[in-house]
Image: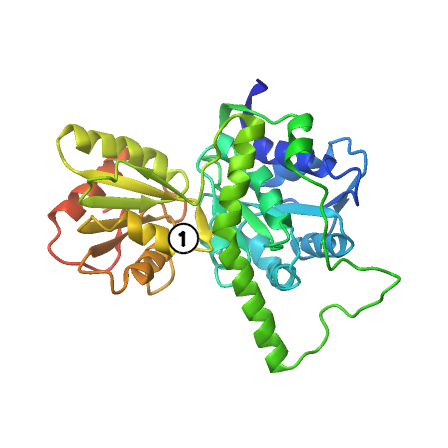
């Protein structure tokens, strides 16, 4: 085993580099890079990698970094980048373009609070502002999950049934800068896992076409329906490639949802990212007290695994959703998704909790307060803020 003590950023950079090198016998690879805390170490790692047939292109802005990836992917190269926070915001126009062009670009999004006021700590609002565009979004909770999910993302994005870009998201500093001992892939393993990248609509000089030209409303509607159909393929395709991943690497990579002690739970708590790790320990505490609580970790936010979630929560009377993000005047974004899924499913109480928004620590005591609150609650309230100093 190739066990090493590395940060989450190192894990992402390592997997991206091996995935890029795996395309050396095809159209090669291209990474457009621009630094922004806390993802800079990812592109620094990639920039030092000795690619056989790859190019790392430093540019003047995040907008241009995605522009480089778009151009490279349209020419059939395996393309990837990384960004965070206001860098993602500056990249917005080209993030939308990448999805609507159906380009299989992979991007590491190190979740950091959007400013102003300027804040470099973890908050998922930066990637979640793209929830209504056609990017697959996967949220990781550990360094191992980052390393493995990044490889899975390339396989998923480039599958001809999907052909959509993927964001691999991780909590700033909690994952990106914390070292853990993990198993890193070898080039031989990645070569076996990732076939050559083939973009079916890549530019062909012998058959010139216009890309992104003016169109009429009916054509745009058809395009959006095709995007929707591709998104609906993702759950089955993801499971197929997870099975292949296990065959080659000998370990599981987590899927859209991970359940823990939910079989007989009357209270189920839903979280994503690193909050889910602490939540698991609190679930164990409450189980030792004889209380029927369980948890679900959401990894795949887009497309949201609605049908699967409904089935898993069917036996619970109360559901608590823990969000490290906030939609102004509304509440947590995962909470909104869960409520939408559960509409018409019965009289379940679905309460939203806002934890760690702006990067605050989510300590076990705060999660205990959430578990207690849901157990003692008689009615749903507006989303409840936690971690605010009184």
Which residue position holds label 1? Answer: 305
- Where does residue 207 sit, x and y in percent of width and height? 85, 65
**Closer-to-camera residue (57/103):** 103
Q: Quadrant of residue 206?
A: bottom right
Q: How many marks?
A: 1
Q: In this view, which residue lies farthest toward the right?
A: 206
Q: Secondary structure at mark 1?
A: loop
In this view of the protein, can residue 33 be seen by the observer? no
The reply, left or right, for residue 241 in relation to residue 355 is right
Work out whether 201 lies above or below 54: below
Tell me the quarter of the picture where residue 295 sits: top left
At a point 53% along the width and 48% down the height, the residue shown is 237
Q: Nearer the viewer, residue 48 or 14?
A: 14
Q: Is residue 294 visible?
A: yes
Left or right of 104 on screen, residue 245 = left
Residue drawn at (69%, 40%), measured in percent from left and top?
Answer: 195
Horizontal side of 299 relative to 154 (left or right) equals left
Crowd class of label 1 (few under 14; some 14 to 19; many from 20; radius 10 Å) = many
Question: Depth check: 331 or 208 in front?
Answer: 208
The image's colouring method is rainbow
Q: Position of residue 70 (x, y in %)?
A: 71, 56
Q: Residue 209's x, y, as percent?
A: 80, 68
| Quadrant the N terminus occupies | top right
Q: On the rendered structure, is 11 left or right of 368?
A: right
Expressed as whole percent of the image width and height from the top left, the position of residue 154 reads 62, 44
């Amino acid at each position: 085993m190739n066990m090493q003590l590395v940060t989450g950023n190192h894990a992402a950079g390592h997997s991206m580099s091996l995935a890029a090198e795996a395309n050396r016998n095809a159209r090669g690879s291209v990474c457009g890079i621009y630094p922004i805390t806390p993802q800079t170490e990812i592109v620094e790692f990639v920039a030092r990698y000795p690619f056989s047939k790859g190019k790392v292109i430093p540019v003047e802005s995040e907008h241009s970094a995605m522009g480089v990836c778009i151009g490279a992917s349209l020419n059939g190269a395996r393309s990837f980048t990384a960004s965070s926070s206001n860098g993602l915001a500056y990249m917005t126009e080209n993030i939308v373009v990448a999805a609507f062009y159906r380009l299989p670009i992979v991007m590491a999004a190190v979740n950091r609070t959007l400013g102003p006021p300027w804040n470099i700590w973890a908050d998922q609002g930066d990637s979640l502002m793209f929830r209504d565009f056609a990017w697959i979004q996967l949220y990781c909770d550990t360094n191992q999950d980052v390393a493995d999910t990044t490889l899975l993302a390339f396989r998923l994005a480039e599958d001809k049934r999907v052909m959509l870009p993927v964001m691999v998201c991780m909590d700033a500093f909690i994952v990106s800068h914390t070292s853990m001992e993990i198993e890193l892939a070898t080039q031989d393993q990645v070569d076996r896992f990732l076939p050559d990248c083939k973009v079916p609509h890549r530019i062909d000089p012998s058959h010139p076409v216009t890309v992104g030209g003016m169109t009429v409303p009916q054509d745009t509607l058809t395009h959006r329906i095709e995007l929707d159909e591709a998104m609906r393929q993702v759950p089955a395709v993801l499971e197929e490639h997870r099975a292949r991943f296990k065959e080659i690497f000998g370990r599981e990579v987590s899927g859209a949802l991970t359940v823990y002690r939910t079989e007989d739970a009357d209270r189920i708590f839903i979280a994503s990212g690193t909050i889910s790790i602490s939540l698991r320990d609190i679930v164990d505490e409450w189980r030792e007290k004889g209380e029927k609580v369980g948890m679900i970790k959401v990894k795949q936010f887009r497309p949201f695994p609605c049908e699967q979630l409904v089935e898993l929560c069917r036996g619970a009377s109360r559901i608590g959703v823990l969000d490290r993000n906030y939609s102004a005047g509304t509440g947590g974004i995962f909470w909104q998704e869960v409520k939408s899924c559960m509409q018409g499913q019965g009289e379940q109480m679905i309460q939203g909790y806002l934890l760690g928004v702006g990067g605050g620590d989510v300590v076990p005591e705060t999660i205990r307060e959430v578990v207690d609150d849901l157990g003692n609650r008689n009615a749903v309230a507006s989303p409840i803020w936690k971690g605010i100093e009184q």
